[in-house]
Amino acid sequence: MHRRNFLEGMLAGAWAVPVAEAMQPLSAGQAGAELASQVTIYRDHFGVPHIVGETEEATFFGYGYAQAQDHLEKMMLQYMDAQGRLTEVLGFNSLGRCYLHFIPYEYRWDGDYLQRLLRTKKTVVENKRQIDPQTYKILNAFASGVNTYIRENRAHIPAWIEPVTAEDIEAEERSNYFRFYSINEALVKLTNLPQEFPNFGSDQFAISIEKSAAGKVIHFEETHMPWANRFQNYEAHLMTPGKLNAGGISWFGSPFFLDGFNDRITWSATWNFPNISDVYEEKINPRNSLQYLYEDEWKSVKVEYETFKVKGPRGAQSITLPCYYTHHGPVVKYDPEEHRAYVVKLPNFDGVNYSTGMYRLMKSQNLEDFKAVFAAHLIPRWNFLYTDKDTLYWVDNADVAQRAPGYDWRKPVPGWTKKTEWGPYFPLESFPQLLNPASGFIQNCNNPPWLSTLNSGINPLDPAPYFQMDKPEPFDGKKGLNPRGERLLKILGHGKKFTLDEVKALAFDTYVVPADVIVPLLAGAYSALENQVNDPRVGRAIENLKAWDRRSGEGSTAQTYLYFWGRSYQELFSPERFERFLKYSRYEIDLGSTEEQEMAIAALKEAIGRIESHFGKADVAWGEVNVVVRNGKFPMDGTGLFDVLHPDAGVEQDNGQIYDNDGWGHIMVVVESDPKEVWSLLPYGESEDPKSPHFNDMAKLHSKHQLKRFWVTPQDILDHTESVWGNKNRIKELLKNS
C-alpha cells in the first residue's frame, strides 16, 4: 500500500470481511437505578421537560431520559455519525465514498470516512482521562438516562440502537465542532470542491435598562436551523437545588444548552466568520508517496486503517480504508500529478473538553465566569451575547491562532516550512467585544463585529488582518450588513424605549428590506418599457407591489409576486446577479439602467406565468403558498429568500407551494427580572411522535404568530404540569425553600 498514491485503491477489497458481532449492551447497574430514584421529570402543556434532581448527576440523568423519550432514533443517529458508524444503519452511501461532500440541509460535511479521518471518537477514547472529572460525571449520568430508556423499551425500538457511553457524548460534541464549526473554514480555502456552502445564520439582540420601557434588560435570540434533520433544537429546563437552574436549547443528543439562561444570566450564540482553520499544501516525494517535505527533510506520512461495518443487500459486510496524516493534520485532498497533498489544521484538534466549555457556560453566575470559558479556549467559535439584570456584553469569540506575516491565510499555505506553524491563540482580551455600549443595544445577525451596534468603535483590522474569513477594509462602513442586520440597526437605533410586546413582535417581523430597491426598480422599468411590455397582468402586478407595505404576511399577494420574481430572476440571470439585491450595495444598483429594467420585467413576466400555472390565478395570498405540513397544513408568513427577520423556508413543491422545514429553529425572549420572564417557541414542537399532541402544537402557535411562556418558578411549573415521571412531590421541596 505504501507504494500507491494516497487515495489510490481505497475501495479495494470492499465487501470482503464479515461484520463482527455488535458490542454487548452496557448495564445501567445500581448507579443508574439510584439516579433514577433521585429525579423527577415534569412536562408542561407543551411537553417541555422541567427536570428536578437531588444532584446534578441525577438531573442530567433525567435529561438523557427525557431526550430519549422524545427523539431517541435521531439522537442515536447523531452518536453513530460521530463514531463514523452510520454505514451500519444507513448503508454504503453513508461512508462518504472517500470524498468530501456537503449536505446543505444537514449543515455538515458528510461521511463516516470523514469522521474517522478526524478521529472524532478515537481521540476521546485515547484521551478520556483528560476530560474534566465533574464534566465526565455529567456525561456519564446523561448516558445512563438514555440507556435506562433503551433498556425499558428494548422490545419497541430498532435493533441497531445500542447503549451509549460518556465517550460517545463527548465525541458527538467534538463532531459538532469539527464538522459544523471548524472544518468548513478550512475547506472553503480549497478550490474545485463539488459542494455548495450554506448561508449559516441566527439573530440576537439585547436592550439596556435605559432603552427598555419597563426598565429591565431584555435579551432576544433566534437560531436559524433546519427543523427536521438530526441537527435539531430541543428545549428543556434543568434544576438542582443550590447547584443549577438553567433552561434553553440543546441539539439532539447533547446535554448542554448553546442558547439559554440560568437564574443569574442569559446567553445566546450566532454564527460568526473567524479564520480559525487552515489548509497546508504538502510537497510529496515523487519516489515515495508516503513522504512529505518539511524543513528540507522527508518526513513519513502517518497511516491509520479504519474498518467500516456496512449494511448491504447481502447482509453486513466490512471495508477497511486508510486515513493519512502529516503533523499538520488529516489529508483531505491529493493531487498525484503535482505531487501535492492538502491537509486541514483545526483548532483544538486533540481536545476532549468540548463538553466542559458548554457545561461551564450553563453554570456561569456572572460576567467573570462567562468570560473565563472563552479565555480558556474551550469553545472554538460563535458570537456570544450575555446579559444579566445590569449588563450587556458581546464577544466575537474565536480560537484564531497567531500567524506569521507574508502569507495569504485565506488560502492554502506552504506546509514545508516551520514559518507557517501556528503560534498561540489570540487572548480573549484582543477579541472584538462590546460592554454596555452607549447606544443601549447590541445586535448581531451574522454581520461583521464592527456593525454590532451604532458607533461600535471596533476596528475591522483588529486583532489581526487575517482574524476574519472575509477580508475587511479599514473603513468598511455598512457594506457587510445583511438585510436582517440592516433592519435591526434601523429599528433599535431609534431614540425610543421598547416595550416587551415590541421586542416579541420582532420575532415575527417580515419587512422585506430588499423590496426597498426591487419595487422601485420594477415600477420604473414598467413606466419606461410599458409600450414594449404590452401585458396588462404586469401592470396589475406593479400596482399591487407599489401599494404593498413590504411585509411578507400570509395575506400578502404582493409577496407572492416578489417571491416568484426572485426565483425567476435567479434562474433567468443567475443566483449571483440576484444576490446583489440581498447586499447592502443594492442601493448602488442603477435603477434607470435599461439592462436592469429589462431583466426585472422579464423576471416578473416569468413569475406571473408560474403563479398562474400553479394556482390558476395571478393574485395568490402568500399563506396559500408558504405552509408548514405537520399533521395538518398551516399558513406561514416570512420568507427565507429575502432574508427577513422571520425567515420561513423550505422545498418548493411541484404544485408551487413551499413546505417550510427551515428558518428560525428556536426563539427565546428573556426579561432580566427576578424571577425571569421567558417566552419561547420551537417551530415544530418537542416530540417526534406524530401521535403526540406535542408533535405540532408549537407549529400551530408559530402559524398564529404566538410565543409560549417558558415556566421558570417551581410554582409555575407545578401549575402547568401535564405529566410527571418520578416522584411528583419532589418539586414541593423547592417550593418550601423558594
Image (tube, rainbow, N blue to C red):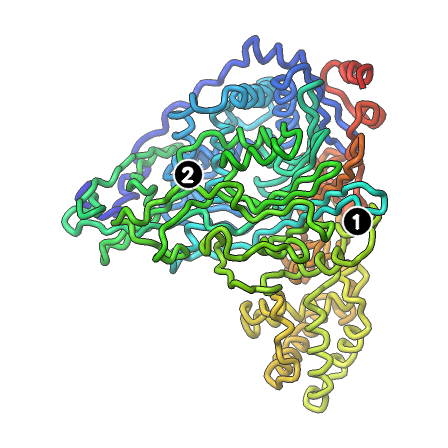
The reply to whether residue 687 is in sight is: no
Can you give x and y, in whole percent of width and height, for residue 445 in the image?
64, 53
Q: Is residue 438 above or below residue 686?
A: below
* Distance Cα–Cα, label 2 vs label 1: 47 Å
Residue, x 42% and y 21% (percent of image)? 129
| Residue displayed at 57% across by 18% down | 151
Helix, strand or loop for disc 1: helix
Quarter of the image where one finds residue 488: bottom right
The three-letter amino acid code for the residue at tag 2 is Gln
Q: Identify the image quadrant of the C terminus.
A: top right
Q: Does residue 337 appear in this view?
A: yes
Which label is found at residue 287? none
The numbered mark at residue 211 is 1
Q: Residues within 10 Å of mark 1 (few under 14, many from 20)?
A: many
Q: Residue furthest left?
A: 287
Read off the residue under disc 2: 115
Residue type of the residue flagged with mark 1: Lys
Q: Is residue 85 left or right of residue 137?
A: left
Q: Is residue 70 left or right of residue 376?
A: right
The answer to whether 108 appears left or right of 626 in the picture is: left
Q: Residues within 10 Å of mark 2 (few under 14, many from 20)?
A: many
Q: Residue 377: where, in percent of width, then height?
A: 49, 36
